[in-house]
Structures are given as structure tokens and as C-alpha cells.
Image (cartoon, coloured by chain):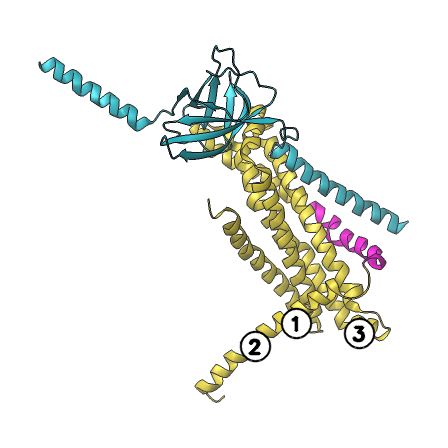
């Protein structure tokens, strides 16, 4: 009888440990099981991808429908090529859809937002989106602003 | 008292170095014998269960209580700092990453060395001083198989599970403080945690850490007991050495493992 309770205790302990590992995987790291296999690839070329990182989300109307899997430089056009994997169930994107790099919140992380075009033809696996809008770069904005004020001052003097 | 000549002092230094290397060699042979020696694990399954009970199940209260309090304190401290930046939702992310990557394996390792390691050393040392180990050898039972191996395996199995339980209880405690007491919005608490914690990067690396610490801490504890001077004073010294060496090994290895896992990004 003594060994029986002891064995039960050990069994419960090992079950609790396994359950804890499972909880860590599912609840804490937010692992989802059903996202592999049913995706397709799209490419997008940006003049400037600054701040976008691999595994960033791809969203349409604010809903996450995929993620960025690779970022590299296209040698021929000198643009940044972003490889995205989108869920198969969203397979009705027109070929003139646009992609832009957006920021969630003021200081949040960068993600790609897709907006729908109007063409009949649809994007297929391995196609690329040409109509893109690059990330906002704060330095460029400040630069434009400064140029504007300088120009205004000049035009006033004349 | 004659003054030692320079040559004698160099000789002493050399002897202590040889002692250290010898002890390392002996402990490695000891480990290999105990883990891979003859005799199946099946016959000693009962012994293993008994040891997991002594090492793992009886360590649960201290692990659960300290995990709960560490999680709650982390949430409280993190909230106080983050709230001044208006981003108190990030408390979930901060607590989860801290626990999974560092505090879970390390604190469990330290508590394990203090709670289970010292008991192992004292128990085996006592067996040695009362000549139970040599009696076993006399009747043809290998003490490495019968006494040491089940304790080693019990340590290897118990500690990673204890670390996982520690993490879960810590996260639960932090959720209790942050969500129920301080009023962080529950949805964003869990969302910020799930967005930032990666299964391989954080959960698996933390588990690898705890397996390494389990290996080292149990090895040190069992070897110190087996190798101690068989007197009551010797057992006391060996127990102290177990706690000190095992704690230092856990902290030192933690730095090395962290540098290997997270150092290059």
C-alpha cells in the first residue's frame, strides 16, 4: 500500500510536468498547430523596407493573413524583395493589389498591409506585387519639411 | 616551522592541480559506470520511482511556492516601471521571457541543489560512513547500479519537469497580480506574451538549460557523497561542497548557455 501511493504520487508529478510543458507551448508561446502546409508565396518589391523584419505579419483590413518569411536585395532593380507566405484560403487577390509597409501604433512593429485592386485576374503562387509603398523614413520626412520651409522663405524674399 | 623553499611551493601547487584533475577523472569514470554500467534499468524501476518521489515530488512545495512569489514580484516590479511609459500590457511579455529564459531554469537549479542535492550527498555519505556501500559490494551488488544510478536518473528526469512547473506557476502568479490586482487588460496581457514568446527560441532553449543544470547538479551531489571522507565531519563538508559547487556550476553554465543561445543576435 505504501508503494502504491508513492507510485501514484510520482505518476501525478510526471503528468503535471508534462502538462506544464504543454501549457508553456500552447498558452505562453501561442503555438498554433494548423498553419503549416496550406500557404502560398508572394513577392513584393519595395524601395525601402527599413525596419521590417522576418516573421512580421501580413495583414488585410487589419486581419493577419500571413507572414514575412524572407527579406533580401534584388540585384537587378536595387530594391528590397520581401517574400510573404499567405494562407491558402485568401487566394482571391487581384493582380493589381498593393502592398505597403505600415507601423502598428506610434512605436509599434512594422507589418505589411495589403489592399485590394480591381482587376479580374488573380495573383498565383510565386507572383509578385509591383505596386508598393515603402516604409516611412523619419529622416526623409524631416528632410522634405526642411526643404519646404527653406523654399517658402526664399519665395517670400523674392 | 621551516620556511618552504620556492621549489617546494611549486611542488605543492602542482600536487593540488593533479588532485583536481584526478577528482575530475574519477567523477567522470564514476558517472559513466553508473549510467552505462551493466545491469538493466528495468530491474531497478522500483528504485527509480522511489528516488523520483524523494527528489522530485517532495521538492514540489518549495518549487511551487517560490515560483508563485517570483512571478508575482516580477509582475509588480515590471508594472511599476512600465506604467510610467504607458505600456503596462508589456508586463506579460516581460515576465514570460524572464521566467522562461533565465529565472525558471536557474532558480530551479539553485533550489534543487539546496533541497535535493544536499540530501543526496548526506544520504550517500552516511551510507558510506556506516559501510553500507562496502556491505553491498560484499554480497555482490554493485552500489553504483543499486544506489547511484537510480538517484542520477531521478535527478535528470525530475529537474526539467520541476522547471516547467516553476515557469507555469510563475506565469500564473504574474497574471494574478497584473490582471486581477493591478487591472492590466487580460487580453493584451496574454497577447503581448504570445506575440513575443517563441516556441523554439524560448521554451525549448529554457528546457535545454534545465536539462543541463539537472545533469550537472545531480552529478555533483551524487559524486560528492560517494567520494566524501567517511566521517560525520567529512559528510558535513561534502554537503557544503555540493551546494556551493552545484550553485556555481549552474550560474556559470547559465552564462555560457545564454551566450551560445542568445549571444549572436
Which segment did they paint magenta?
B41-61
Q: Nearer the viewer, residue B260 or A69?
A: A69
Residue B54 lies within the magenta run: yes
Q: Using residue B260 as the reference point, say whether residue A107 is left or right of it.
A: left
Comparing labels 3 and 1, the label whose residue is closer to the camera:
1
In the rendered structure, find residue B134 and report the number of the disc placed on it.
3
Mark 2 or mark 1, earlier in chain: 2
Between residue B3 and residue A120, name the one nearer to us. A120
Residue B24, position as x, y percentages in the image: 61, 70
- Name the residue at the bottom extreme: B2
Measured along the vertical axis of the image, is residue B84 above or below residue B159? above
Q: Residues within 10 Å of mark 2 (few under 14, many from 20)?
A: few
Element under disc 1: helix
The percent coordinates of residue B212 (x first, y second) are: 62, 54
State how far apart marks 2 and 1 are (Cα): 12 Å
Residue depicted at 55% across the width and 46% down the height:
B102
Quarter assignment of residue A16: top right
Residue A65, numbered label: none
Chain B palette colour: yellow
Among the two numbered marks 3 and 2 on one chain, the one whose residue lies closer to the N terminus:
2
Amino acid at each position: 500500500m505504501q508503494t502504491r501511493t508513492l507510485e501514484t504520487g510520482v505518476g501525478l508529478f510526471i503528468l503535471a510536468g508534462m502538462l506544464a510543458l504543454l501549457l508553456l507551448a500552447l498558452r505562453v508561446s501561442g503555438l498554433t498547430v494548423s498553419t503549416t502546409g496550406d500557404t502560398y508565396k508572394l513577392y513584393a518589391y519595395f524601395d525601402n523596407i527599413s525596419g521590417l523584419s522576418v516573421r512580421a505579419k501580413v495583414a488585410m483590413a487589419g486581419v493577419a493573413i500571413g507572414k514575412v518569411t524572407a527579406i533580401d536585395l534584388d540585384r537587378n532593380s536595387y530594391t528590397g524583395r520581401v517574400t510573404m507566405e499567405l494562407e491558402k484560403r485568401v487566394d482571391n487577390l487581384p493582380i493589381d493589389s498593393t502592398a505597403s509597409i505600415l507601423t502598428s501604433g506610434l512605436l509599434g512593429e512594422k507589418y505589411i498591409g495589403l489592399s485590394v485592386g480591381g482587376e479580374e485576374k488573380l495573383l498565383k503562387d510565386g507572383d509578385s506585387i509591383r505596386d508598393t509603398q515603402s516604409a516611412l523614413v523619419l529622416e526623409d520626412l524631416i528632410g522634405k519639411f526642411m526643404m519646404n520651409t527653406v523654399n517658402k522663405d526664399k519665395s517670400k524674399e523674392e | 616551522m621551516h620556511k618552504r623553499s620556492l621549489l617546494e611551493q611549486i611542488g605543492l601547487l602542482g600536487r593540488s592541480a593533479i588532485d583536481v584533475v584526478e577528482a575530475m577523472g574519477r567523477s567522470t569514470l564514476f558517472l559513466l559506470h553508473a549510467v552505462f554500467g551493466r545491469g538493466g534499468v528495468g530491474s531497478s524501476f522500483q528504485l527509480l520511482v522511489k528516488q523520483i518521489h524523494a527528489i522530485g515530488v517532495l521538492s514540489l512545495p518549495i518549487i511551487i511556492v517560490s515560483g508563485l512569489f517570483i512571478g508575482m514580484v516580477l509582475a509588480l516590479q515590471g508594472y511599476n516601471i512600465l506604467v510610467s511609459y504607458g505600456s503596462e500590457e508589456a508586463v506579460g511579455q516581460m515576465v514570460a521571457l524572464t521566467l522562461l529564459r533565465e529565472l525558471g531554469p536557474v532558480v530551479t537549479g539553485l533550489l534543487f541543489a539546496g533541497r535535493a542535492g544536499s540530501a543526496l550527498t548526506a544520504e550517500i555519505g552516511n551510507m558510506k560512513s556506516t559501510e553500507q556501500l562496502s556491505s553491498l559490494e560484499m554480497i555482490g551488488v554493485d552500489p553504483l547500479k543499486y544506489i547511484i544510478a537510480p538517484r542520477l536518473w531521478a535527478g535528470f528526469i525530475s529537474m526539467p519537469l520541476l522547471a516547467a512547473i516553476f515557469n507555469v506557476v510563475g506565469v500564473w502568479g504574474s497574471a494574478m497580480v497584473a490582471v486581477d490586482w493591478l487591472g492590466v487588460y487580460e487580453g493584451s496581457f496574454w497577447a503581448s506574451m504570445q506575440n513575443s514568446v517563441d516556441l523554439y527560441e524560448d521554451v525549448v532553449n529554457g528546457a535545454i538549460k534545465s536539462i543541463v543544470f539537472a545533469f550537472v547538479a545531480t552529478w555533483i551531489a551524487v559524486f560528492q557523497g560517494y567520494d566524501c571522507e567517511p566521517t560525520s565531519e567529512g559528510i558535513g563538508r561534502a554537503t557544503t561542497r555540493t551546494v556551493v559547487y552545484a550553485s556555481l556550476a549552474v550560474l556559470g553554465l547559465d552564462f555560457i548557455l545564454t551566450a551560445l543561445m542568445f549571444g549572436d543576435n
